[in-house]
Structure formats: C-alpha cells, structure tokens
Amino acid sequence: MPIITAPVLTPPTGPPGGGTPVPLPEIGLATASYTDPSGIVWPLTDELAGWFTLSEGVSGLGAVEYEYTSDAQPRGGERLRHAQPQPRSIVWPLYVYSDRDHMEFIERWRALATAFTRTLRPGPDGRRPPGVLEIARPDGSRRRINVWYRSGFQGQGKQGTGILSDTAVITLWAEDPFWVDANTISVHREQGAGRDFLSPYPAVSSSQVLGETTVTNPGDEIVWPTWTITGPASLVEFTVTRDVQTSTGTETYTESFTLDPAEVGHGPLLAGQQVVVRTEPPQVRFEDGSNWLGALNWPEAVLWGLDPGVSDVTFALTGAGAGSAVDLQFNARYQTA
C-alpha cells in the first residue's frame, strides 16, 4: 500500500485594507489592522480611512516580558528555576479625524470605540471574545495576537480637540503574549489504495505506521498542534522523539499518546469517520461533537507540543486501510511582531 505524503504550507496573503507600510517602533516597516469580535476589519495604518496610527507612541510589540522564580545559592547569587511569560500590554495611539464636519468625526469615533470595547461584552457562552491585532510585512507575512481593550478611548481633552479630530491612546491587553503566524502549517499523511502483492511487482508497506517524518516548527516557541484522524482505524498512536541538552550531554526522550475508540464504547473508526484532538487545552471531539477525551490512554498520555526547530514524529494506525489519514496543523508562535 503506497503512502501518500504531502506537507502543505498555506501561502501568505496581505491583510484587507492595511494601507501603506509605515515605520513602527520595535518592529520596523509594517501595516496594521484590527478585527473586532464581530469580524469587522479596521485598517490602522491607512490615512484615507478617517483614522490612522501615530506610530511615535506605539509600544509593546517587542519581546515578551518574564517573571523569574529563582533559588538563592549558598555561595551567593541565585539560580533561575523558572521563567514565566507575562501578559502583554500594547499601547496604540489612534488619530481620528474628519475633513467634512463634526458629525462625521463623531460617527467614526463612536464606531471605533465600539469596535475595541466590544471585547469586554460577554458572548453567548459567557466568555469575552478577543479582538485580533494583525501586523503585516511588505513580503506578505502576517503575525497576529488576541487582544482585549483596557483603556484609552477618552480623547485628549484639550481645547480644540473633539470637534473635527482627536487622539485615543489605546491600551490593549493580551493574555497570551506571543505573536501567532496567520498562516497555518499543515502536514498530511494518507494510506493509499491497496494493490495485489505480486502485481505488477512485489511490494510491501505497513498497515500500521502511516507516517514517520520530521516536522519543522519555524517559530520561537513551542506550539500545540491539532490532529484530525480519519478512519478506518482501530488504534492511533502519536509519538515525538526529542534530543534534550543536559549538564551531562545530549539525552533522547520520547513522548506519546494513544487514541482508542473502544475506550468510549465506539469500536474502530469506520471509513471517513473523523476525530479531532487538540493538545492545548486538551480536547478530543468525535465528528458529531461528542466528548472523546476518555479515549486517550490516561494517565500515561502526554499531549505533546512541537519545540522550535525539527522534531521526529511518528503516526501509527492499527487497522489502517484505504482513506486512513492523519492531518497535523499548527501556527508558529513568535516573540515579536
């Protein structure tokens, strides 16, 4: 049975209405846009929109800040035990204006204020959905971060402001401080159709090991992939092999988790049936939305992530047949925009 191997990287596209690239502190030449929780895209570096970014006051786009946990050493000093990434605050001055009249300015001001503060309005599930700040480069690459409005849409309160123009110095808060690549990296492994062992030539392939491959995480930080398993399959095992530098040299570690449909009373996956496994936060869903978290081999299961660089990954399916497939997807994470 042939193995069809097709890593896919979605090609980048520019943001809608981004405007002309402008110099931004900490990151250089870029365009910016903001997508509010309702899905409306607001260009932030296009003067023709009726508002634009005052780049001189922008901050919070650089490397992540950390809080250290350390242990005092008997001979003086301390030893770093843990470094915890801290939430990110982004300051974004936005100049809003009208060339026509006061009411046009007010309409723009109100609309933008609503777009940012909408992140504080609870949705149907009780959660407050974030907006998305996106930074695009001249080469078409884009990085995003989820943000919530914190403060700043009060205007300057100076004489002459608030008639045809004003500046809002907005502070945005990001619970996850890392920037995420807008383009999803996908790896696809599929079992091909069977054929006769002796026709036209002798051929042997495993019905269990669907893919032994290297996966490259081009980002700065560990990523937590999403897996989609397509049947037929009766048991699926995902394994990563890591080389870790220690004080005594390089050591090799293996982490894995196994999905067994029988553990939730389903039996083997039939042809075309799908299960989606999310590694952060842990979630396993069958195609009808039912919770299959119990199908994992707890407590041994480790829903591992991909470290920056190259990882050796194996997908092993028992009971694989024509159409059996595994899809891995993730978005690289970065320190800066």
Image (spheres, rainbow, N blue to C red):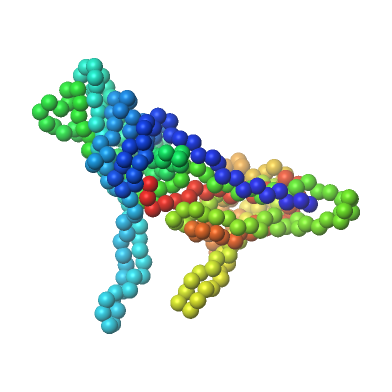
In this rendering, the answer to whether 172 lies above or below 3 is above
Q: Position of residue 267 (x, y in %)?
A: 70, 51
Q: Position of residue 165 (x, y in %)?
A: 20, 26
Q: Position of residue 12 (x, y in %)?
A: 50, 39
Residue 179 vs residue 301, the one in the foreground? 179
Residue sitting at x 56%, y 60%: 311
Residue sitting at x 20%, y 29%: 166
In this rendering, the answer to whether 201 lies above or below 70 is above
Give the side of residue 71 with respect to residue 289, left or right: left
Give the side of residue 284 with respect to residue 326, left or right: left
Residue sitting at x 60%, y 58%: 214
Residue 134, quarter of the rendered image? top left
Give the side of residue 74 with respect to residue 184, left or right: left
In this rendering, the answer to whether 285 lies above or below 169 is below
Residue sitting at x 72%, y 45%: 323
Determine the residue located farthest toward the bottom in the rendered image. 75
